[in-house]
Image: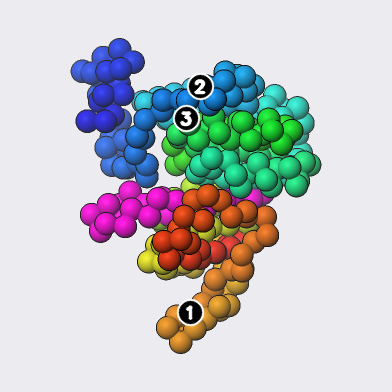
Amino acid sequence: MAAKAERAATGEDLTAPVPEKFHRQPYSFVRRGDRLTARRQKAWDAYAPTHVLDLPRSIGDTSVAEGAIFDQQALYGRTGAPLVVEIGSGLGEAIVHRAAQVPEANFLAVEVYTPGIADLLLKMAQAGVENVRVAQANAPELLDHLLEENSVDELWVFFPDPWHKARHHKRRLISPAFADKVARVLKPGAVWRLATDWEEYALVMREVLEAHPDFTNAHAGEGATEEDPTGGWAPRWDGRVITSFERKAGEAGRRAHDLTFIRV
C-alpha cells in the first residue's frame, strides 16, 4: 500500500504493472515524515542543490533507476580520490567528522530521511566540509544502479534498524543478498565497517559476513569470551564518533558491537 500511495501522489497510472522485484524485496526503512523545521529548511534550500544528487527515479522518491551515473569529476571536481560510502548516515555526525579529517577522500552519504539530510548539510556547512555528497536513496538500489563495480574503497553501515521483532527480520539490511551487492562495488582489499547496539543483530551480521566467500573478518577470533568463543569483534574504530543515537543506546544499557570485514 505504501508503494501504491507514493505512485498515486506523483500522478502515476496505478493500472500500470509494478516490477516484480519491488514486491519481493521489502524496504529496510519506514519513512515517518519529512516535514522540516525552519532551520532545517534553510539548510536544505542553501545546500541541497549543490550537495544532494539529482538521481533518476523508477518507483518512489527513494528509488534509483537503472542507468544512473555517478560522475565523481562532476560531483567532487576530481577523480582518483578514495571513495567512502556510508549507508544510513542519520544526522551526518559520523561522515562529516571523518570527511573533515580526511579531505583528500570523497564521501557519499546514503540516507532516506529528509530531516536527517538537512541536519547533515548544516553540519557540513558549519564544519566547512566540501568533500561530502548525499544520495537520498534506497541503499540496495543505489548499490545496484549507481555505483560501479570495484569503485568503493570503504563502506560503513553503522546502527542500521535492528527490526528486532521476528516477523520483521526480513526487513533487516544485512543479509546474504545485501552482502552480494556490497561485494560488487567494493575494490579488492576495501574495508566494510559495521556497528550495532543490538546484540542479536550483531551475531547475525557476523554470521552472514563470515559465511560470505567475498569477505574475511579483519579481527577473526578477537574478543572471544566464554559466552561467545567465536569472537571476531573489532575494536572501536577511532574514525567512528559517538553519535547521539549511540549515547541513547548506552543510556538504555545497550553497548555497541563493531565488525570490520575486508573484501578479498
Image height of 262 relative to 14, above or below: below
Label 2 element class? helix
In this view of the protein, can residue 209 be seen by the observer?
no
Residue at point 41% right, 61% down?
Answer: 252
| Residue closer to the observer: 158 or 143 | 158
Task: Name the residue type under label 1.
Answer: Thr
- Quarter containing the N terminus: top left
- Label 3: which residue? 114
Disc ID at residue 38:
2
Of residue 104 and residue 235, the one placed in the foreground of this image is 235
Q: Quadrant of the C terminus?
A: bottom right
Q: Nearer the viewer, mark 2 or mark 3?
A: 2
Instruction: Tell me the magenta residue range.
Output: 146-174
Residues under numbered marks 2 and 1 in contact, where contact means CB atoms less than 8 Å apart: no
Looking at the image, residue 100 lies above or below residue 78 = below
Residue, disc 1: 230
Tell me the crowding category of disc 2: few under 14, some 14 to 19, or many 20 or more residues within 10 angstroms, Cα based.
few
Residue 227: x and y in percent read 42, 83
Mark 1 nearby-residue class (10 Å; few <14, some 14–19, many ≥20): some
Residue 188: percent from the left, percent from the top? 65, 55
In the image, residue 169 lies in the stretch drawn in magenta: yes
Mark sitting earlier along the chain (2/3): 2
Q: How far, Cα to Cα, is label 2 from label 3?
A: 13 Å
Q: Closest to the observer: 260 or 215?
A: 260
Image point 45% across, 41% down: which residue?
A: 140
Q: Position of residue 65 (x, y in %)?
A: 45, 27
User: Which is more N-terminal, label 1 or label 3?
Assistant: 3
Q: Nearer the viewer, mark 2 or mark 1?
A: 2
Q: Is 55 inside the magenta-drawn segment?
A: no
